[in-house]
Amino acid sequence: MGAQPNISEDLRMVGALKRDLLDRHPSDNALRKHPDVQVSRDTVGAWLRGDRFPQKVEPLLAVLAQIRAEAARRGLLDAPTDSTQDSTVAELLAPDRWHTSWQDEQRRRTQANQDAAQRQRAHSALQEDERRARQAALADRPRPVGSWSAQRLGVHPAIHTGPVREDGFVLPLYVPRPHDTELRAHLTAAAADGARPQMVVVRGASCTGKTRAAFEAVRAAVPADFDLLFPADADGLLAVLAADALGPCTVLWLNEAQDYLDGPKGEAVAAALLRRLDDLGPLIVVATLWPDHNRTLARRPNPGESDRHPKARDLLAQARYTYVPDSFTGHLEAVREAARDDNSLATAVQTGGVDLTQVLAAGPDLVEHYEHPAGEYGPYGRALISAAMDAHRLGVAGPLLLDFLQAAASGYLTNTERATARPDWFAEAMAYARTQVKATIRPLQEIPRPSGMGALPGVVRLADFLQQHGRRTRGTQVPPASFWHAATAHLTDPNDLVSLAHAAHWQLRYRHAAHLYCAAADGGNTHALLTLARLRKGAGDLEGAQRLARQAADAGNIDALTDLAWMREDAGDLEGAQRLARQAADAGNIDALTDLAWMREDAGDWEGAERFYRQAIDAGDTYALVALAGLRKNVGDWAGAERLAIQASDAGVADALVVLASLREEIGDRKGAEQLLRKAVDAGVFHAVIDLVELLKDAEDGEEAERLARRVASTRDSDALIDLAEELKGTGDRKGAEQLVLEAVHARYPRALRWLAESRMEPLEAYNRYGLDPEGTLAEPWEWPEPRIL
């Protein structure tokens, strides 16, 4: 036959022979039933069409033997295969020919696969070389997992009572707990060949051992040939991701993940990480988070509230979580056993408590050093630490400037301490605040440079444990005036300034709030401009409010367009208001569509209102379903209202339950209404509490109504007490409202004091009675500052 046979073409010839000369006999079904074939009918058909190469030669030879037998039975072996060929049927179906042809094709395919694999390896090696080159140009670079020390990855050093390493870092024996098994299982699965990229979050309070647990889990579960990358900050992480330098078989270490996700670059970081998690694995993102930071990042905004962390929330929603408990309750025997060979553990066990990780990290000793200052300069060091606590708990995310702490300290000192301060008080106070407690940790700590050696000049950070201690013990304290003045004078990060301005406004320091908003606006923060506009509007300065809101809108803040729209609506310019709201909606603010609907509803244009509600729903505003349900109810379409409310409830909008409850009450189904309202209360809808209380009172169940209000109040924070009181006040239950507020007053909660001041008595009388300094509050008039950018 001369030329090398092509097995696919020859198979097609056999198929044509069976079809044309043998009248499709034997059938594909009959051929596959032979004991040596054992493949499906479709597979046999694919062979004979040349579409598929047989993986084994024996089934193919069995098929061809059956076809040859049928050709012999019909006397066609010596017939030509077709008019274009000079070969016979017998030659085409010869077993030796097919055996040789199959082996040649198998060798060709094997070689092709080997060549392709070699090309892929070469391509992968080239990609890896290019990635390594990009990594070399970055400030933060990956290194083998085993080359990272616990100290370098952020594990707290422990107290010690005996010999220590030359660098002074003490790492006690590790005592596993149940969460360690779970965490290591997460990492093992994420490191497996072919695994998709995975984020693992280790959540726990300060000094509970979350970073140590993550470190031990990586050492135990991640293969030694993996790299680990620990970026110094959000900018470094963004640079790594932008350079596509985070390859497979890598652990990305995000200790204190809030430092990357909750800040000016946080949403960009979260978006870039989401894109990387959709790429090739295995890749493991190991993040540690405090519970309060986790709640901040994962919280969904209330209706009408701006959404600060949508990408971070999406990122954390797909993570696997491991929760580290605060104590060793139930595991003390294992600790005592390990303590026989470890001095640090033995010292911690001697305290007799179960919060061993906090003791190991010298947490209680830090608090003792802070709360009971010793020596001439101890009170001055305590003042610096107090200012740092207030800065962190009120929103300063980054390093603390020494100039800020020095300027803020005076308000935390007594008159005598200020009067007798020596010229070198600040240096000595810093020495006290930087004392190494238990040879382990300092209250105020230096911050290493992102690259190179040494510490960043002029800044410090507060120890994690003291940050949490400050939140617990100073949560109801209002910082002194020196704190706010120092912040305005020395802080420059617009996000820090806005956070402090929010806190100042919430704590009735209106003058300080306005100056901080102005400073943030001067730094380019358009949200600060818009907030100033809202303050102006609330004080009756509509002209100033419009000027600032227009400035914010011109700078690209689309929320400002919505505010301008409402200002025009308040001024009676409905047409202008709608034009501005439409601009906001066209710019991407879907809440503006709901605002347009409200404006049309206020004007009595039901059809126009519904049209805008529908547009908002189509744009993804599920809360608009509730508003539209209310509109349909108001026009008498109860069936339509119920459908929309059910749709909103199914989408997770708990407020829809209140609409459904009102519909049940309208038809006399009080039990059904009560059940729906209780469900809404459990979901945190405060106005549902009031509706439910009123429903119970109407049913002459006053005791149950009071118990409900008490129960809800007891499970919420002071903010919730005030919200509930405001709702009760709106129903005419002034006495019940004041009783709730007094609970918050006992905790010296500023908003509660303001509530009493505004609703019971003259402001100054209220503040004097409850011991709140009226400086900067309603009791003292002040002039509006102007942002310099105007």
Image (spheres, rainbow, N blue to C red):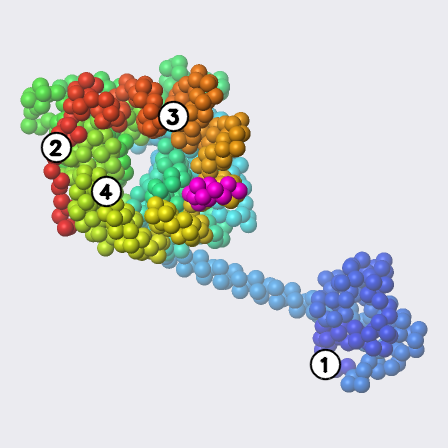
> Who's the residue at 84% across and 82% down the image?
80
Rounded to the nearest whole Å, what is the CA distance between mark 3 and mark 1?
A: 88 Å
Q: Nearer the viewer, mark 4 or mark 1?
A: 4
Where residue 83 appears, as percent x and y from the top left, is: 80, 85
Please tell me whether mark 3 sits on a helix, a strand or a loop: loop
Please tell me whether mark 4 sits on a helix, a strand or a loop: helix
Residue highlighted by disc 2: 781
The numbered mark at residue 716 is 3
Residue 692 to residue 264: above or below: above
Residue 282 to residue 368: above or below: below
Rounded to the nearest whole Å, what is the CA distance between mark 1 and mark 2?
A: 104 Å
Where residue 398 appears, as percent x and y from the top left, is: 26, 39
Residue highlighted by disc 4: 534
Rounded to the nearest whole Å, what is the CA distance between mark 2 and mark 3?
A: 33 Å
Say what amino acid the circle numbered 1 marks: Ala
Q: Earlier in the sequence, mark 1 or mark 2?
A: 1
Q: Residues within 10 Å of mark 2 (few under 14, many from 20)?
A: few
Residue bounds of the magenta highlight: 626-639
Residue highlighted by disc 1: 3
Rounded to the nearest whole Å, what is the CA distance between mark 4 and mark 1?
A: 88 Å
The numbered mark at residue 721 is none
Magenta stretch, main secondary structure, is: helix
